[in-house]
Image (cartoon, rainbow, N blue to C red):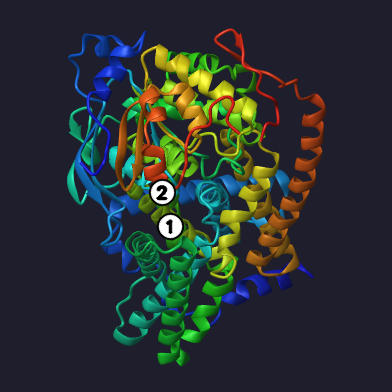
Amino acid sequence: MTTVAVVEVVTGGLVGLDPSVGVPLQGGVDVVSDAAFGVLLWLLEQWYWLMDWVHYVTGLEMLNPRYRYMHRAILVGLCVGVMAPLIGTFLVHRQLALIGDALAHTAFAGVAVGLFLNAVIDLGVSPYLTAVVVAMLAALLIELISEVTDAYNDVSMAIVLSTGFALGTTLISLNAGGLAVGVNQFLFGNLSTVSPQSAAILLVLFVVIVGTVAVARNQLLYVTFDETAAAVSGIPVNWYNRVLVMLTAMVVVGAMQIMGVILVAAMLVVPVAGATQVSRSFSESLVVSVVLAELAVMLGIAVAYYGGVTAGGVIVLFAVAIYVCAVVLGKLLSVYDQQQAPDTGSIQVDGGESGTSANDD
Amino acid sequence: MNGRDTGAATAAATAGRAGAGSDAEAGSSEPVIRLADVTFGYTATPVVEDVSLTVDPGEYVAIVGPNGSGKSTLMRLMLGLRTPDTGAATLFGERADRFDDGERIGYVAQHASAAKEMPVTVREVVKMGRFPHVGFGRLSAKDWSVVDDALATVGITAFADRRIAQLSGGQRQRAFIARALAGEADVLVLDEPTVGVDAESVSAFYDLLSTLNDDGITVLLIEHDLGAVVEHADRVVCLNREVYFDGPTDRFVESDALARAFGTEARFLTEGDE
């Protein structure tokens, strides 16, 4: 496939898009001050400059200065590669791996709400902003259902997932002619539709998510590992649970731009599952999961560009392939560790032999 | 009093323990835990009813009872994880469900929920004990020193950098005790900590608890293993929705509280019994 043809394929998604997609922050400017938004766009300009420089050094066609949408897609991909496994690590080890899927479906409902409002009353609101709002409300609803009804988490997730998708499809069917074209990109993601405004939204989400995890890492770790002990030690567990699901909603909406609703949950789970296989500590697993996610995202974007295929699907396929490699490596490391493990036949307590065997349970 | 055997048990048990903390010896400190006429139920039927008991500093108290007797619920009431329907629960003199000095309490469950799969090292687990002290900050050199001391105290320094899942059941429970010690807890609350742990490790585990208790740490143990309780605890609370016995261990062995609480002909076997 020639370069020209590739560009046609990749940019083809822009043709016929809902107008609100081209200016996703149209309504959001009211929320984010002009000054702050100006700073974000300035940062974006610096990113373009960096990508231009990398293009001149490497000669990579997809980084050609003419393809700003690719520069933005790579920026979004890099951010998603950090924040998805960062949050996913806490979710997976709390056995909440499917919450991303539930919130992605409610984010779809949020997109439908935005598109519906724009089509019906010409509100001019960004579908991504409505997606953030609806997904965060849904995140709180999941927690609320679990707390109030004592239902298992997967029950509340299933309820919210179904409700979200039902709401989305209903709203779309109400005005099918006007919305159908714009919905596909949200379902499957599209590299070419990452607008400067959408990238700016993602940068804000990135700062909020990484900043929150950096600040509350201790508490999130304790709540994840042993919720009861964390509660006894004075950590407000319910409050941190809510924070975690709301951060998840932000990640889902951020990643939705290139991954699509259907595949976004994979970035929360697959790199973390791979990192768990090969990491020896929690700190290491955080770093490794980010590295694996970035690897999948970058390979996926590159193959999607040069192969003219959907980025979300390719990214997930790479992530799963990396996961399989991690499982094999983990098994090999496990065998090696067993060969190298020191004798743990007894342990000393205050200088005395306690006689605990290594495999006493 | 519904056939319950209570009385001067608390004072006797505390006074009889050598090496208890200075507060206990002074006899002037407030109780660690105090329940006054506590009743609680998840539905209209109470799970614990009209329970009153006090745990003083330096005591080694075991709560025993048949399955479904309300032991774990009572523990959650004591720790402020549940609020009594009637009556009052206090921790160090404060209302338990509003107690905000959590680092004074070390909690050890049967098993941590995520322990088996999570790639977390023993040192990282013990480090969690310092989190209430450091809040949003990072651990200082002094904090890490406390963590290392806690690891050494329970004898698992050699395993500090191994994943917690790679440890045996007994070693894992030691790690959780080390976490409580790292938090400089005044009281250890253990909810059936030796479930799934083999007999040899159980013995070593209780020896460790006794050592810590001798050093002045209050121990509150919820346990199904009556043999271990009789061997190690100074005081027994026998529960089956209400308190059937509260007193020194030797009196518990001699009493008929066990049979009444368990509703069977249960009794302690002594040497020579068939």
At 44% from the left and 69% from the top, the residue drawn is A107
Are dots 2 and 1 in contact, CB under 8 Å? no
Depth order, front residue of B70/A230? B70
Q: What residue lies at 79% left-to-right and 42% top-to-bottom? A: A331
> Residue B247's x, y, as percent?
31, 27
| Disc 1 residue crowd, few under 14, some 14–19, many 20+, Cα 10 Å | many
Q: Which structural element holds mark 1?
A: helix
Q: Which mark is residue B263?
A: 2
Q: Distance from label 2 to label 1 (Cα)? A: 55 Å
- Across and down, in percent, residue B140 comes to 42, 18
In the shown orientation, is residue A319 left or right of residue B243?
A: right
Is A152 rendered above or below residue A332?
A: below
Q: Amino acid at mark 2?
A: Gly
Residue B77 visible in the snapshot: yes
Count all numbered tags in the image, as a single digit.
2
User: Could you say where residue A196 lies in the image, as x and y percent from the top left?
Assistant: 46, 60
Identify the residue position indicated by label 1 in the image: A250
Label 2 crowd bin: few (<14), some (14–19), many (20+), radius 10 Å: few
Residue B160 is marked as none
Disc 2 is attached to a residue of which chain? B
Q: Amino acid at mark 1?
A: Met
Residue A68 drawn at (x, y percent): 56, 59
Quarter of the image with the N terminus of chain A in it: bottom right
Above or below, B221 relative to A171: above
Mark 2 residue element: loop
Q: Nearer the viewer, mark 2 or mark 1?
A: 2
Which of the 4 image quadrants contains residue A339?
top right
Would you say residue B131 is visible in this rendering? Answer: no
**Left or right: B44, with A176 as reference point:** left
Query: As rendered, which of A293 and A46 lies closer to the eye?
Result: A293
